[in-house]
Amino acid sequence: MVYLYTGQFLSKARTAAALAELFGTPVSAGTVAAVTARAAGGLDGFLGLVGDRIAAAQVAHFDETGLRVEGKLRWVHSASTGKYSLITVHDRRGREAMNAAAVLPTFAGVAVHDAWAPYDTYPQLTHALCSAHALRELAAVSELAPPDQWCWATQVAAALRELNVLVHHTKVPDAGAVVEQVRRYHDGVVIGAHETRARATKQERKHHALARRLRDRQGDYLRFVTDHRVPFDNNAGEREIQMIKLRQKVSGCLRTLSGAAQFCAIRSYLATAMKHGINFFDALVTLAQGRAWTPAAT
């Protein structure tokens, strides 16, 4: 039941119908809900352990996305590393929800995330802003520029891509080439902020804010250049919550906040198990036997 519902994203009703047909025994959606709640109830210790290990990591990814629960917009938050995943749901998107997840308040490493302002309210963090997000924003600016005219956003985007190649895709980065691309990035954002300083239109205000953010937080956007533990983007964080969005697309919104919390708890368990080479079904069998699989200390 839990495998089909949380692992394969069937709705409770479809899970019940599938099991009834497979085994010839009537199963209700309420039974699926009860079994799922029981499974999630066995994960309190596991979730605390995973949260503590992410909080102790040198580098971690953070992201958030909306989810319809009880017909309202709620927020799913993820905190993750290459070995651990913690997914939580909350009424809020900002600091209150982040504190409830209990990772960011004690995390003191490098936090890879987008430019969502509440992340900046944790002064003990070292920030690494997602350059893939920046590239999407820069592409939106470039698309509005005349095709035969130089655009600051095009130069900045090209510099970011070249830096990614130099740092992450060459065995020995050319230090001179890296310095040159950092200069191109800096010159581009300075020119962009200057060209849009009038902020005469809504579009120009938006472009000015982007240029200033890229200029003022250059160190955070280029963290991957100076710290090779840091990735170019936050794709790893985004992948953690893509499964939640897929579940909503396949089976619609969740009916209760408690049910959403149970679903996220089990997804945290399954995602972490998968990162340790444990398949979903084996992890759930262990959980059903009353002894949740626990990753060994590393």
Image (cartoon, rainbow, N blue to C red):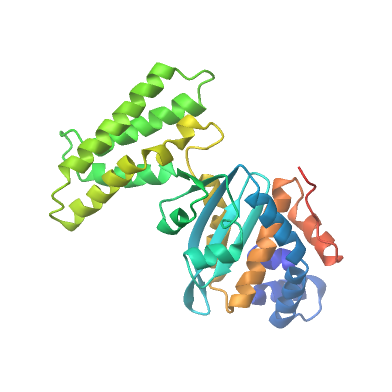
Q: Is residue 220 above or below residue 167?
A: below
| Residue at the (73%, 52%) spot, across then down | 273
Please give left or right for residue 241 compared with residue 132 in the image. Answer: right
Q: Quadrant of residue 45?
A: bottom right
Q: Position of residue 46 (x, y in %)?
A: 75, 60
Q: Is residue 219 left or right of residue 235?
A: left
The C terminus lies in quadrant = top right
Between residues 194 and 290, which one lies in front from this camera angle? 194
Percent from the top left, x then y, of residue 209? 26, 50
Residue at 64%, 53% (x, y): give it.
Answer: 85
Q: 82 or 9: which is nearer to us?
A: 82
Q: Is residue 179 left or right of residue 173?
A: left
From where the camera sits, is residue 1 visible? no
**Rendered residue at 33%/31% (across/down):** 158
Task: Tell me which corner region of the image, top left, top right, bottom left or bottom right, holds residue 184.
Answer: top left
Give the image location of residue 163, x and y in percent.
41, 28
Number of marks present in the image shown: 0
Give 8 or 236, whichever is nearer the viewer: 236
Is residue 168 visible to the viewer in this orientation of the structure? Answer: yes
Name the residue at the front extreme: 123
What quarter of the picture does the N terminus occupy?
Answer: bottom right
- Above or below, comparing residue 167 to residue 202 in the picture: above
Q: Nearer the viewer, residue 246 or 177?
A: 177
Q: In the drawing, does residue 57 fall left or right of residue 288? A: left
In percent of width and height, residue 194 lies at 18, 41
